[in-house]
Image: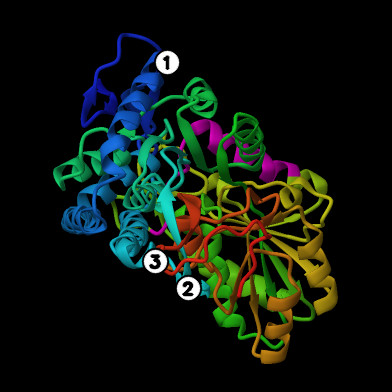
Amino acid sequence: MDRISHYIDGKHWDAPAGRTGPVFDPARGVQTSEVAFADTATVDAAVAAAARAFESWRHVSLAQRASVMFAFREILNARKEELAAAITAEHGKVLSDALGEVNRGLEVVDFACGIPHLLKGSFSENVSTNVDVYSLRQPVGVVAAISPFNFPAMVPMWFFPIAIACGNTVVLKPSEKDPSAVMLLAQWFTEAGLPAGVLNVVHGDKVAVDRLLEHEDVRAVSFVGSTPIARYIYETGTRNGKRVQALGGAKNHMVVLPDADLDLAADAAVNAGFGSAGERCMAISALVVVEPVADDLVAKIAERIARLRTGDGRRDVDMGPLVTREHRDKVAGYVAAGEAAGVRVVVDGRGVSVDGDDVGFWLGPTLLDGVTPQMSVYTDEIFGPVLSVIRVNSYDEALALVNSHPYGNGTAIFTNDGGAARRYQHEVEVGMVGINVPIPVPMAYYSFGGWKSSLFGDLHAHGSEGVQFFTRGKVVTSRWLDPSHGGINLGFPQNR
């Protein structure tokens, strides 16, 4: 069985025999490899390599950093099908979706290629007589990135290209469920000319995470995952003096007003609810329908679900399996709990017919109607292909429902009323808003992140806020003396 090792100081790092974790092909239901779990000594070795590399990488010119980034971009673009295949083999999402993930990560690499412009400071001449003031941004040092299983390539690329372009060095801890994509990215970055130690990869679980959060040489931590873990990452990291951005969970609402195009809304609900088997932090899981159109919309969605094909993502299907057997069983448990609470199971994915191995981790698209805010299928982040329909009687009731939920990651409104849409984007307490767009993931030059319990920390991922997170600001006030300087003056400095 293949063994996936760490990547430290520009090479594969064969750690001594120790704890390992299984890596599955979720469509076949079989273990395909094992991944080494880092102990504290291995994490220390990765951090030490990153600290050594930082001493020289921080002084590399912006032009040279951009040149390495461009070379990495070309390698990634040429080999993205290989990366997508690795994602499908370990996560299960269909190949077209995996390729879409890679392309969205590539957009952040494109953004990072512009680092000479992104790190431009400002300059004010003669703020006082013969005194100039200018600002600059400098790297923070060694940074850690901890990424989730659902986007094994895209989410790491939200962080490490920008961090590296800004002059930092990185220790990346990917999900142990699907680690191979990150290993390819690290190798390709080295091939592009990145010096040894600038990007390091350690695999593992809480042992590795805790050591990164405690290590005195790690200056900043980026994380994406569930809210309980995000809160833990934020509290532990900040307690140890780290700068932390921790993106947590979501319960994304899609509000459909009575004047909406119901065919468009039905297509959007299916696409956003069941793509990647619902394992997206921006998936629509709560469909809030303002009456009297709920019956028509539910019927249209059910018709579309009936045409979806579930199966092995390497075949001609629409939706793949869930990532592990345990996660599939957990999601199915939510469906059972909703059924016991009285919801109507319009489409039941627990008995789905699949184009794939019978022992794969299958759960088909599931549509629940009559969900109320007290039910666990509404309150909890399910992270699976379960779409819950909540019926309300007015825009105000829909808005109040969205704003009262503890998560505030993403939301969408479907309407043909521009005034209602503008009012919603102003009043809703959510970080990312779509208007007739079901998955409002910002482009790389904007920043990604939610509100409330969906984000811990002040700065969002990628875009200008990503550059701010991975750099520290410095303001310099300078005066170059000439023979006509005023001599000694003990008065308080004033602008004149």
Q: Judge whether 201 appears above or below 387 on screen.
A: above
The structure residue drawn at horizontal position 50% and vertical position 54%, both measured from the top left corner, is 473
The quadrant in which residue 172 appears is top left
| Nearer to us in this view, 286 or 434 | 434
Q: Which is closer to the viewer, label 2 or label 3?
A: 3
Q: Which is closer to the viewer, label 2 or label 1?
A: 2
The structure residue drawn at horizontal position 54% and vertical position 29%, both measured from the top left corner, is 213
SS of the residue at dot 2?
strand
| Nearer to us in this view, 100 or 207 | 207
Q: Position of residue 357 (x, y in %)?
A: 36, 39
The structure residue drawn at horizontal position 56% and vertical position 60%, both measured from the top left corner, is 273
**Which amino acid type is marked by label 2?**
Ser
What segment carries the magenta color?
318-337
Horizontal side of 41 relative to 248 (left or right) equals left
Please state, as top left, top right, bottom left or bottom right, where the N terminus lies in the image.
top left
Residue position marked by numbered label 2 in the rendering = 124
**Which amino acid type is marked by label 1?**
Asp
Residue position marked by numbered label 1 in the rendering = 39
Horizontal side of 307 relative to 17 (left or right) equals right
The structure residue drawn at horizontal position 49% and vertical position 54%, both measured from the top left corner, is 474
N-terminal of the pair, mark 2 or mark 3, is: 2
Q: Position of residue 453 (x, y in %)?
A: 70, 49
Residue position marked by numbered label 3 in the rendering = 483
Horizontal side of 49 relative to 291 (left or right) equals left
